[in-house]
């Protein structure tokens, strides 16, 4: 794909083109968000609406049990959320197929 035809010249162009669209955001601490991106800045601070947060918690393995431990998933929804940029690991734009 030719960057000149998509309007993407720099990494933040991809974020700019995702404004008003649903994005996936991976955060530190095994947290993931999906929401509509309203604003961002150079520090990757984000403002999202219609947000669903998914938190994954792993219970440690019991010494008497052979396995990986159990993963618990907690979800919650929020109308509006400010995400501080230093916790952002990844921002994925909506798929454009």
Image (tube, rainbow, N blue to C red):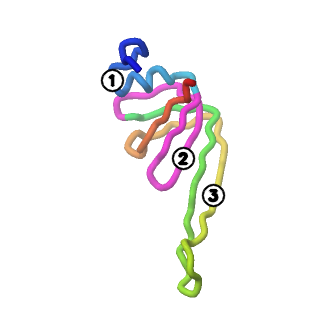
Q: Name the foreground residue: 6 vs 79.
A: 6
| Magenta residue check for 32 | yes
Disc 1, SS: loop
In the image, which residues are magenta?
Answer: 22-43
Residue 54 place in picture, x, y as percent: 60, 49
Q: Is residue 73 left or right of residue 15?
A: right
Residue at the image point whose x is 61% and y is 38% from the top: 51
Which quadrant is the C terminus positioned in?
top right
Residue beneath disc 3? 73
Instruction: Kindly identify which numbered label has been placed on residue 47.
Output: none
| Quadrant of residue 89 within the rendered picture | top left
Q: Are the residues at dot 1 and dot 2 in contact (C-beta closer than 8 Å)?
A: no
Foreground mark, 1 or 2?
1
Instruction: Kindly identify which numbered label has been placed on residue 32.
Output: 2
Q: Name the foreground residue: 43 vs 67.
A: 67
Residue 4 place in picture, x, y as percent: 36, 13
Which quadrant is the N terminus positioned in?
top left
Q: Are the residues at dot 1 and dot 3 in contact (C-beta closer than 8 Å)?
A: no
Around disc 2, counting alpha carbons within 10 Å, would you say few (fewer than 14), some (14 to 19), or many (20 or more)? many
Q: Name the foreground residue: 75 vs 18.
A: 18
Q: Residue furthest bottom?
A: 64
Q: Residue furthest top?
A: 5
Disc 3, SS: strand
Residue 7 place in picture, x, y as percent: 40, 15
Mark 1–mark 2 distance (CA, rounded to whole Å):
24 Å
Residue beneath disc 1? 10
Residue at the image point whose x is 55% and y is 66% from the top: 58
Around disc 1, counting alpha carbons within 10 Å, would you say few (fewer than 14), some (14 to 19), or many (20 or more)? few
Mark 1–mark 3 distance (CA, rounded to whole Å):
35 Å
Q: Is residue 2 left or right of residue 65?
A: left
| Quadrant of residue 33 within the rendered picture | top right
Q: Is 34 rendered above or below residue 28?
A: above
């Amino acid at each position: 794909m030719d960057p000149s035809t998509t309007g993407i010249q720099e990494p933040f162009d991809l974020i700019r083109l995702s404004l008003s669209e649903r994005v996936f955001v991976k955060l530190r601490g095994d947290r993931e968000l999906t929401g509509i991106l309203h604003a961002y800045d150079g520090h990757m601070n984000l403002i999202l609406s219609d947000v669903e947060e998914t938190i994954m918690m792993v219970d440690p393995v019991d010494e008497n049990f052979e396995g990986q431990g159990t993963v618990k998933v907690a979800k919650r929804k929020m109308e509006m959320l400010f995400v501080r940029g230093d916790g952002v690991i990844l921002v994925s734009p909506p798929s454009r197929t």
